[in-house]
Amino acid sequence: MSLRTQIEADNTEILTDQDDFGWPLTITDPDGLSKPLVGYSADISQAIDPDTGVVVSGRMASIAISISVLTEAGFAGLPEAVADSDSRPWRVSFEDTALNPYTFKVRESNPDRTAGLVVCYLESYIA
């Protein structure tokens, strides 16, 4: 097995293992295909202002999910930002540890095809 194949397998195992990093989330594509999956999610409220270097309050939500998990779930492509406000965006829903539900849209998508995963930066979404 090549190193790249091993990295993809390891990442998939880590991201989908609900005893460790894996967390239930639902991904919905612009066409309405919606699947419950397992990946890594983060939702924090502290950031560093890039202009001043000062810590500021601001919501930063993201997910990391295996590309093979998305493919096996039947998604035709990878999540991506949809700039047209009249079009439906890729959406991600998950609960925090207190089981409060949140829905986001994909603001930025960063696939790593070498490691077999995609990291998506999210922003709040109200349908």
Image (cartoon, grey):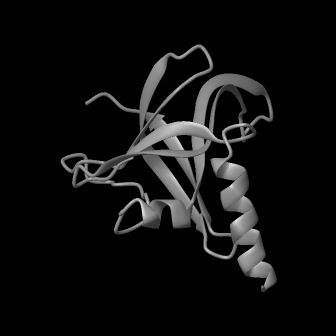
Quarter of the picture containing the C terminus is top left
Q: Quick one: 10 or 114, which is closer to the camera? A: 10
Asked if 77 appears above or below 114 in the picture, the reply is above
Residue 96: percent from left, percent from top: 58, 22
Asked if residue 125 is positioned above or below residue 87 in the image, the reply reads: above
Report which quarter residue 59 is drawn in: top right
The residue drawn where x is 36% and y is 63% is 75
Nearer to the camera, 13 or 110: 13
Q: Kindly give the residue lying farthest to the bottom in the view shown.
A: 2
Quarter occupied by residue 6: bottom right
Tell me: residue 11, above or below residue 17: below
In the displayed structure image, the side of residue 53 where residue 77 appears, left or right: left
Q: How many marks?
A: 0
- Please indicate whether residue 93 sits to the left or right of residue 49 in the image: left
Q: Residue at x 63, y 49 (%)?
A: 16
Image x and y of residue 86, in percent? 18, 47
- Residue 52's place in the image compared with 119, above or below, is above
Q: Quadrant of residue 21?
A: top right
- Residue visible at 75% across and 79% down? 4
Work out which quarter of the rendered image holds the N terminus and state it: bottom right
Please tell me which residue is depicted at 34% across the width and 54% down the height of the picture. Answer: 82
Residue 104 as seen in the image, left or right of residue 42: left
In-front residue for pair 92/105: 92
Residue 35, horizontal then vertical, whole percent: 37, 47
Residue 61 falls left or right of residue 21: left
